[in-house]
Image: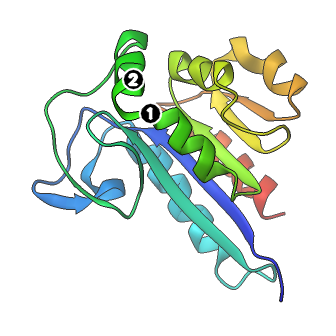
Amino acid sequence: MKKKYAILVVTNDSTVFSKKGIVEAMNIFGGRLTEVRNLYLELLEKSKGHPRETVVSFGIISTKYGFVPGNYCIMEYGDVMSCREDYERVEREKQYLEMLKGASTFYEKVVVCVPKDMFSMMLESEVFGDGTVIAVTHPDFKGECERRGWTHMARSGARVGRSNAEEIVKMLFP
């Protein structure tokens, strides 16, 4: 049986809700999350018909629900985390780092697009294995990413930036 190539794209929630009611997590948020969702959709499209059978997944770290796959249905909520204290509070309540750590072990590559303080918490908690991550984050983490065998990209744009997105697609689908 041929092994599938698996890619996970991870980001955090947004204060902008595009839809009301119960909606797939990846479609309920707008704003800054849109860039990451567009990257995911581009990777998903590239995976179709690719010679190597590929699974592309999308996960969101949400304030109310913790870490959820992008296709899980959730409802909008009022309080959205926006600083390290919020990220730490939600981690205590929802244990999203441990959930992400478990989920990410099934993927060869994890594309991470989260704020600086959340990324710092991921490093401190050793969420991802060496050599598996493409981190779109603050330049302060470039050396640490390189030490772990990860690819570092400085954020350009709301969360990813068009040039970074194009480079990520080229890396994952050469």
Q: Are marks 2 and 1 in contact (CB under 8 Å)?
A: yes
Q: Is residue 9 above or below residue 161?
A: below
Residue depicted at x 28% and y 46% = 29
Q: Is residue 60 above or below residue 88?
A: below
Whether residue 89 appears in this view of the structure is yes
Residue depicted at x 42% and y 17% = 88
Residue depicted at x 19% and y 27% = 79
Q: Quadrant of the N terminus?
A: bottom right
**Residue 65 % position (x, y):** 30, 42
Q: Is residue 169 above or below residue 99?
A: below
Q: Which residue is label 1 attached to?
A: 95
Task: Look at label 1 and name its amino acid.
Answer: Gln
Secondary structure found at label 2: helix
Q: Nearer the viewer, residue 51 or 21?
A: 21
Whether residue 160 appears in this view of the structure is no
The part of the image, by quadrant, that contains residue 50 is bottom right
Q: Which residue is label 2 attached to?
A: 92
Q: Residue furthest bottom?
A: 1
Residue 69 left/right relative to 154: left
Mark 1: few/some/many CA within 10 Å (<14, 14-19, 20+): some
The part of the image, by quadrant, that contains residue 91 is top left
The part of the image, by quadrant, that contains residue 54 is bottom right
Secondary structure found at label 1: loop
